[in-house]
Image: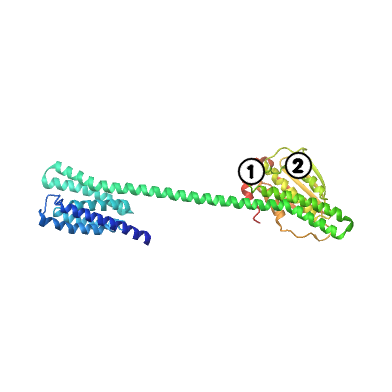
Amino acid sequence: MTTQRRAEAIGLDLRGAALMALLGTVLVAIDLVDIWGQGTRGPSGRWWHLVPLLLLCAVMVWRRVRPLTCLALGVVVFAVETAYGGSIGSLLVIIELVYAAGLHGRGRAVVSLDWAIGIGVAASGLSVWALTGDLQDGVLTALTVFAVFGTSFWWGRSSRRSLDLLAAQRRQAQDEARLAELRAREERRGEREQMARDLHDALSGSLAAITIHAEAGLHDERSQRRALEVVRATSKDAVRELQSMLAVLRPDVPMTVSPSLADLPALVEHSRSRGTEVTLHLDPDPLPELPAPTGQALYRVLQEALHNVARHAAAPRAEVAVTVQDDLVLTVVSPLPPGPDRAEPGLGLGLLSMRERVEALGGHLEAGPSGDSWRVRAAVPHHRGGTRETSTQKTGTQESTA
C-alpha cells in the first residue's frame, strides 16, 4: 500500500472510529451494558465501559492498514470487558474488527484466523455446557458466537473475493485495451510503410525516366522535343500514380483496385511508351486467375525491374517472361552497360522491396549479372498464394522498414 493510500485509509477509519465511539457512548448512556449478566449496574457503574469502548475505537483507526494486529488487540480489550459484563457498543466494534480482518487480511494468518474462529465457537459452547450442565445453553452459545463472529468474518472474506475478482477483471480490461492500442499502432505503422514502399515502386521509375530523358535533351538538341514529350507524359503518369496512392488516405474516396497479373501487358505497353523496348512472353496466355496478393506482388516486381532497366541498362531493352507451372516464375533480362553504371544512385530500396514482396509469398528472388545481361528471376509457389494473403499483408508491415 502506498503512502497516499495508507493516509486515505487511516482517514476513513478515523471517521468510522469517531462515529462508532459516538454510537457506543449513546448505548452506554441508555444502559445497554452488562450484556453477559455480570458487573455493576446503575449510573455510577455503567460509565466505566467507555474506557474499553474508546480503546477499541482507537484500535479501529488502523483496521485497514493492520487488520490482524488490530483484531488481536481488540480481542484482548473485549475479553477483559466481557469478564466484567461487556457492552453492546464494544460488541459492535469487535464485530467490525472481525469483518475488517476478513476483508483486508492477507496470507496464511487469515487462514489461521478462520480456524481460530471455528475453535472459539466450539470452545464457547463447551465452556457454557461444562459450567451450567445445560447442553441447550451450550449449543445456543456456540450458535450465537458463530452468528456474531463467524458470519462477520465470512462476509469480509466474501467481499474480499468479490473485490479481487473486480480488480482482476479491471486489469484484464486494461491489458486488452493496451494490446488493442499496440495492434492499432502496428497496423498504422504497417500502412505507412506499405505506402512508402508503394510510392517508391510507383514513382521511382517515372522520376528516373524523367531524369534520363531530360539529360538526353540537354546533350542533343535534335531530340529535345521528343525528350520533352516523354517527360511530359511520364510526369502525368507520376501524378496519376501519386493521386491514386493519396486517395487511399481519404475515407470518402472509393478504394482503387490493386494491380494484378492481368495488368502486366498494360504495364509493358506503358514502359514501351516511355522508350523502353520490351518483349513479353506469357505461358499460358492468358495467365490463370491467381490470388490478389500474388498478382499485386508480381506486378510491383516487374514494375521495379522495368524501372531499373530504364535507369541502368546499356540500351533500354528487356525480355519479360511469365510462366505458371508448379511455381509462378517471372524473368526479366536486360543488357548490361559496357562500363560503370552512370545512372544517379537510388536509395537502395528497389531490390530490397522486390525481394521482400516475393519472400512474403513463400518464394525467392534472384537478381544479378548473367553473362552480358542482368537477370531478375522471381519464383512464387502460386498454389499457396491464396492461403498466405493474411501473412502477406502482415509481412508488408515489415517490408519497407529497410
204 on left or right of 360:
right
**Callout 1: SS:** helix
Name the colour scheme.
rainbow
Identify the residue at horizontal 69%, vertical 54% (top origin). Answer: 352
Query: What amino acid type is highlighted by mark number 1?
Result: Glu
**Front position in the image: 315 or 247:** 247
Q: Is residue 55 above or below residue 154?
A: below
Q: Position of residue 263 (x, y in %)?
A: 74, 42
In this orientation, which residue lies closer to the viewer: 169 or 231?
A: 231
Name the residue carrying label 1. Answer: 389
| Left or right: 379, with 15 as reference point | right
Q: Picture coordinates of residue 380 (x, y %)?
A: 70, 45
Front residue of 215 and 175: 215
**Residue 339 figure quarter:** bottom right
Relative image position of residue 391 (x, y in whole percent): 62, 46
Comes first in the chain, label 1 or label 2: 2
Task: Specify whether residue 349 is in view.
Answer: yes
Residue picked out by circle 2: 323
Quadrant in which the C terminus appears: bottom right
Mark 2: which amino acid?
Thr
Label 2 crowd bin: few (<14), some (14–19), many (20+), radius 10 Å: some
Across the whole image, how many numbered discs are drawn on residues?
A: 2
The tag on residue 292 is: none
Name the residue nearer the viewer: 174 or 339: 174
Q: Is residue 345 above or below residue 328?
A: below
- Image quadrant containing the N terminus: bottom left
Q: Is residue 376 visible?
A: no
Please say if 384 is above or below 66: above
Counting from the top left corner in percent of width and height, residue 136 is at 15, 41
Neighbour tally class for label 1: few under 14, some 14-19, many 20 plus, Cα within 10 Å: some
Alpha-carbon span between mark 1 and mark 2: 21 Å
